Amino acid sequence: MLWDYLSFVIGNWDSEVIIMGDFNEVRDISERFGSIFNKHGAKAFNSFIVNAGLVEVPLGGFSFTWCHKSAKKMSKLDRFLIFDNLMCSCPSISSTSLDRFLLDHRPIIMREAHYDYGPVPFTFFHYWFELDGFDKLVEQTWSKANVNDQNSYSKFMNKLKYLKEKIWIWARLHKESLNSRKSILKAELADLDGVIDKGKGSDADGHQRREVVRLIQEVEKVDAMEVAQKTKFKWSIKGDENSKYYHGVLNKKRGRLTIREILVDGIWMESPHLVKHKFFKHFKNRFETFNKSRILLERDFVKNISLELNDDLEREVSNEEIKKAVWDCGIDKAPGPDGFTFGFYRRPISFIGSLYKVIAKVLANHLVTVLDDIVDEIQSAFVDFEKAYDSVKWDFIDDILRRFSFGEKWCKWIQRCLYSSSGSVLINGSPMKEFQFHKGLKQGDPLSPFLFILVMDSLHVSFQRVVDAGLFNEIKLDSSLHISHLFYADDAIFMGQWSLCNIYTIIRVLDVFYRASGLRINMNKSNLIGISVNSNKVKHAAAKIGCLVLKTPFNYLGSRVCFKIWNLFERVFNGADVNSKKPSWVRWKSVLAAKDVGGLGVSSLFALNRALMFKWVWRFFSQKNSLWVRVVKTFHGDDGKIGKKVQPMYPSTRLNIINEIESLKLHGIDLVSFINPKLGNGVNTSFRDVAWCGDIAFKNLVPRLYALKSMKNIEVTSKLSHGGLEFSFRCNPRGGVEQAQFERLKEMVEDVTLSNSNNRWSWSLVSSGDFSVSSVRKLTDNAILSKGISKTRWIKEVPIKINVHAWKVIHDYLPTRFNIS
């Protein structure tokens, strides 16, 4: 009743609305502590807020506003609700909870505070490319920038600084001109509407009005493109060019992310100077190195870089490599300190030099070519390292490179990249003064992932030496396959026989690794699991080393999200709020179906999920020598149970994937049949059982002939290396069907030539032969989704929402009076 009454009052109010106080209700389970969460009450409260067009002002300070006298129950009951338009026009509005002292409720205060954190750095906007005169401005400004500096890099940076100043002036003048033009057009539109409203409008007035509206839309589109980049929305989803929407998103984002005050040693600080100082001090200390002494690697690694590879790494960089490095970087990613994105450097007029990221990308492209020769296969996947990238010592990286036998010139290049690192913290969009880094790898640096792989490989080398010395008892799957550890990025899994000796060995190795590299194990995120081990033993061991206990079954790096995403898609398409129900006038399968069969081409998550599952089946064939494939074969046989419907005796993700792929056959989809071998040298390829020549295996193509075979498992290379195909037959083919099939077989293989390359697998759904998720997704959707009578007509020049609405009209998917009745 209260929400209905407030909705009635707000609906009859013709001005802005602010509602504040104790609502005695929460919006989410996280707003209750120690008491029961009423989801129906929260649903009604959230529906009232959405339907009334209200938004909640972000609350700073404490998480809960009410506390029971026992201090065991807390809730967030007090809040400010304001009109959405008010939040958009006043993005600096914020609220804070204060100390409650003897009260059970904390006082809350709302205010619009403007703090000056300093100038905002230059940002390059991609829509400038589409404006007349911009290309010419850049070209002329760059050619006129006379900088006298012997250092090429310094000269380039100074010319870039000069260019930024000119672009800034040009952009400001263009913005002023655009706003002036928009005001003139709106005034002209108002005059035309006035004439038309009096009944004096002519055909010429109507034509002129349409032209004025078109020009206003062009101006607003430019404005919307700028705001869209600020909100980090991908402009590829064109159609809903709604600048008001983007402005709303931007203002809400600014309001949510703005730092207004920070809590330091129990004291709230608001002064921009103090806030910036504390952040600067925190991050500067984070990248300092206080302990100069460390443990050194004592001998070279078994796998190392050859002289030929070193020469290749250190060769002179070509113009094509520089261009590839630039083109490999996303055009709309976050800009560097200079404010320019890589979209700028891709333009022919501005491809005029190189920044650090280009240099790093070139080196990374060189480095990736040699990693397979030195990095062990265990680098594929519950120890978690604390602030991994931030903590790596640079002298340790240099030590690793030399142990891998990288050349002197390459090591110096990497040192220059590391030791030239500096950073600046952005507070509310304003940068502080730069400070020097003394350790760590930069997030977003193209080199960082590859250098970190080498760091983790050094841990592998160290731990493998411990295993080889008999100080750690690993898991033995069979006589040739032993596993003791796996790495994935900054996560590590150690596996061995259960014993306290094994556990302490892991801890000692990780402690030595920390002293050498700076990477410390994060015990708060690390887990200990015992398979068929008494739970009390596991708890006791975990308590001793200070980590968590993990129980089976468990998920690693994954969670179930398909149903939630599907539900979200449906609600967005139907225009329904999360907390409300709304009738759907469209069969969801019709929305998912391809446009060629009358749908909207959204595609189903069911198909995507199965395609991603099947990718593991494809990898089983194409990565047959990898560690994970060898493990699967140990448990499930050489065929990995592919093509079989099996009932798992224990929880098995692998077998669940196989069963899901098998169940697709009920829809007429046999994905495994699209995997065919591409012949190379013919080794390890069955002449009889595999479709290596054509789409059908010979055992099915010429069955009568193969009843004669005495050597049914003969390989292609053995069969073709002999003079005639009669080799391996019990007897020569007789007349009739046998002779006809024999002649057909000879005709098919007479032009086959073996090569020196290895055999590989080909995906027949794609002309290139390379597996793609999209091909499986399309095939699955076409088989399971409904098909319309005709294709969907889709006009690219028309906004998406108009295309969708037209589709609904054609198919009568609207709540018309007839449909409702």
Image: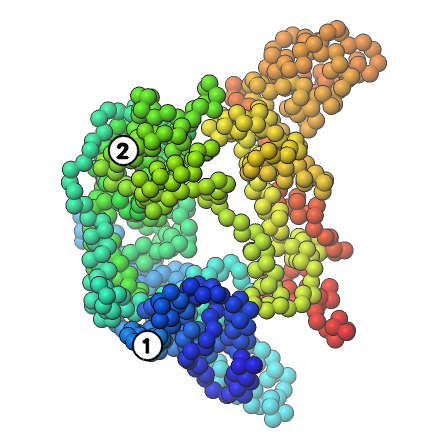
Q: How many marks?
A: 2
Q: Give the secondary structure at mark 1.
A: loop
Question: Which mark is nearer the camera, 2 or 1?
Answer: 1
**The disc labelled 2 sits on which kind of residue?**
Arg
Question: Which residue occupies the foreground of this view, 308 or 652?
Answer: 652
| Residue 584 sits in quarter | bottom right
In the image, residue 396 sits, relative to residue 608, either above or below, namely above
Locate the C terminus by quadrant.
bottom right
Question: Residue visible at 60% across and 43% down?
Answer: 610
Of the numbered discs 2 and 1, the one sitting upstream in the chain is: 1
| Residue 635 sits in quarter | top right
Q: Percent position (x, y) of residue 364? A: 35, 39
Question: Which residue occupies the foreground of this view, 784 or 2?
Answer: 2
In the image, residue 718 sits, relative to residue 411, either above or below, namely above
Work out how far the residue at label 2 is from the one at label 1, CA to CA, in angstroms. Answer: 51 Å
What residue did someone put label 2 on?
A: 508
Residue 103 — which label?
Answer: 1
| Residue 70 sits in quarter | bottom left
In the image, residue 178 sits, relative to residue 167, either above or below, namely below
Left or right: residue 779 versus residue 459 is right
